[in-house]
Amino acid sequence: MTRRRKFHRRVYLGILRRQRLICACGCGVKLIRAEGYQFDHHTALALGGADTPDNLRAVRVPCHKEISAVDIRMVRKAARQRKAWLGEKKRRGHALPSRPFDTRLRRKFDGTVEARGSA
Ligand SMILES: [Zn+2]
């Protein structure tokens, strides 16, 4: 996971100015200092998001809670998919069925069938 950095005050002020002091979640509510606002990683760090100012956005505290809940669900899902991809997840259902023919016999190129190990 990408490391979380702290930026200079100017960077945060620039983000606020970029958003014209409006919550970035889409609710359209103005950010008020008294109400509190936080800086959210638009693409979560755990999902490969960069810890750079352009991936940061200011959101109201209640909005941030909702965003984080969604982010956490996405992070968990990504972890499940990664696990399945790596084969660490238990396979559900049956493995491939055994061969439907008698493995003790073999057919030669000319078509004759003989017991394995006899020749
Ligand atoms: Zn909002």
Image (cartoon, grey):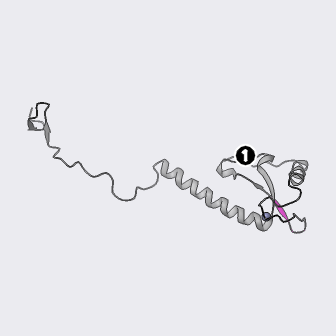
Asked if residue 9 is positioned above or below residue 26 in the image, the reply reads: above
Q: Is residue 66 above or below residue 77?
A: below
Residue 98 to residue 60: above or below: above
Residue 11 image position (x, y, % from top left)? 87, 48
Where residue 91 sits, quadrant-wise, is bottom left
Residue 18 rendering spot, x and y as whole percentages: 87, 51
> Is 36 one of the magenta-colored residues?
yes
Q: Amino acid at mark 1?
A: Ala
Secondary structure mostly seen in magenta is loop
Mark 1 sits near ligand 1, with its Cβ under 8 Å away: no
Up/down of 116 relative to 59, above or below: above
Which stretch appears magenta? 34-38
The residue depicted at 85 percent of the width and 60 percent of the height is 22
* Label 1 sits on residue: 50
Q: How many marks?
A: 1
Dot 1, crowdedness within 10 Å: few (<14), some or many (≥20)?
Answer: some
Left or right of 67, for residue 19:
right
Q: Secondary structure at mark 1?
A: loop
Query: Residue 55, percent across and down?
Result: 76, 49
Q: Residue placed at 53% from the left, 55% from the top?
A: 80
**24 left or right of 21 in image:** left
Q: Would residue 18 be counted in the magenta stretch?
A: no
User: Which quadrant holds the C terminus?
Assistant: top left
Residue drawn at (13%, 37%), measured in percent from left and top? Answer: 107
- Position of residue 118 measured from the top left corner of the image (x, y, whole percent): 8, 35
- Ligand 1 - quadrant of the structure image: bottom right
